[in-house]
Amino acid sequence: MQSRVEILGLSPDALTTACGQWGQKPFRARQLLRWIHQRGQSDFSQMTDLARDFREQLQARAQVLTPPVLRDHVSADGTRKWLLDVGGGNAIETVFIPETSRGTLCVSTQAGCAVHCRFCSTGHQGFSRNLSSHEIIGQLWLALRALERDGVRGRVPLSSDHLDDDDTAEPRSRLISNVVFMGMGEPLQNYEATLAALRIMLDDHAYGLSRRRVTVSTSGVVPMIDRLRLDCPVALAVSLHAPDDSLRDQLVPINRKYPIDELLNSCLRYLDRAPRDFITFEYVMLDGVNDSDECAEQLLERVRRVPCKFNLIPFNPFPGSGLRKSPAERVRRFAQRLSDGGRVTTIRRTRGDDIDAACGQLAGEVRDRTGVNERIRHRVIPLAEAQ
Ligand code: SAH
Ligand code: SF4
């Protein structure tokens, strides 16, 4: 039997093409987008403004399938985390972060990650596979349904130190107003599926999110930053984490392929089409590794030519990382130096840490197929000594 199309993950263009192949007019694609994404309908027989024979055709040929929910936790601060089964022993995580004037969903793009950053628990687990577009958009679909059903607990006032601190204009009724690609995986190493999911998120007949409110976070896959710039420029966050190549080579191994200057050049190119006039540089604060005053000064010098903001992320430790978080006072001091140097700098507030939903704690469960995990484990050198 022919397998059914995962209609949830079809971009608006792909859905229009599919409708054409099914002998339907293009506007049917818009109707389907509204039924599936706006109303959350997964049963074609309920899509009452479609002709009965088209509904039957859809039932035979397509399906709206989301990954099964393995666990669903709500933290004391209202942060909610879903563990989703993506088959083959792999599970991924999706996190919802409520605030008074916005709701942010953090989505995953891969089961595991092949970049293997030194401080990231996803990276430590190795890589299993890319998620398909329906598994990525399915996280938004599922989260919206769950929040509509259960309501949002614990909306807390907007912190002044959050990533998108200038964006409070959206109507309060929108449960999920922002999406960040900051869950498990490197979105730009799963480009096509990420792109399809982005196009669905932005489409007015689907989720209608603004480009400014959808942020792709990357460890720095330079050629794909250039493609995203052309295909679908949304807000961009770049995980910098170090002011020089020798340290970044160790923390973010993809730096050996795309060193800092190349990365900064791609950021500059991106900016001419970006929906915001700055790049957000994320910087995880690691005690004794990248948090000295000298690092702050070098960092300012290094990014001098790039319009940017900094978002400092307190390191979330996990077993076996061999790293420590910088003391709060050090983080504040580092932030102050960057601000004094003229860069808007925020410190990310940790949310949901009682349910391990904070950045980099998203471990899910990954069947590592690369073997890199084991190799890395055998050559871990304490970073402070390795410098
Ligand atoms: N792969 C992409 C997006 C997912 S990671 C990227 O690296 O940008 C999202 C953010 O969480 C990145 O900035 C990453 O550096 C950060 N992060 C990873 N592990 C962390 C940890 N243990 N503590 C704090 N932040 C972490
Ligand atoms: Fe992958 Fe991002 Fe984690 Fe690095 S920080 S291992 S790129 S998920």
Image (cartoon, rainbow, N blue to C red):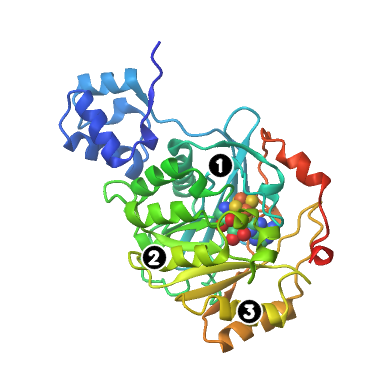
Question: Of the residues tagged 2 and 1, which is closer to the observer?
Answer: 2
User: What residue type is disc 2 on?
Assistant: Arg
**Image quadrant in which you'd find residue 8:** top left
User: What residue type is disc 1 on?
Assistant: Gln
Specify the label residue 298 is tagged with: 3
Which residue sits at x=29%, y=35%?
14
- Tell me which numbered mark, 3 or 1, is placed earlier along the sequence: 1
Q: Which residue is mark 1?
A: 110
Specify the label residue 269 is tagged with: 2
Q: Please, what secondary structure does the residue beneath circle 1 have?
A: strand
Considering only vertical position in the picture, is 286 above or below 224? below
* The N terminus, quarter of image: top left
Q: Residue furthest bottom?
A: 340
Question: Of the residues tagged 3 and 1, which is closer to the observer?
Answer: 3
- Tell me which numbered mark, 2 or 1, is placed earlier along the sequence: 1
Of 140 and 309, nearer the camera is: 309
Q: Residue furthest top?
A: 1
- Tell me which numbered mark, 2 or 3, is placed earlier along the sequence: 2
Name the spot of residue 251 as percent of width and height, x first: 69, 59
Which residue sits at x=60%, y=77%?
299
* The C terminus, quarter of image: bottom right
Q: Ligand 1 closer than 8 Å to the CB at disc 2?
A: no
Q: Is residue 358 visible?
A: no
Q: Ligand 2 closer than 8 Å to the CB at disc 1?
A: yes
Question: Distance from label 2 to label 3 (Cα)?
Answer: 22 Å
How dense is the environment of label 3, judged by Cα within 10 Å: few (below 14), some, or many (20 and up)? some
How dense is the environment of label 2, judged by Cα within 10 Å: few (below 14), some, or many (20 and up)? some
Considering only vertical position in the picture, is 359 above or below 140? below
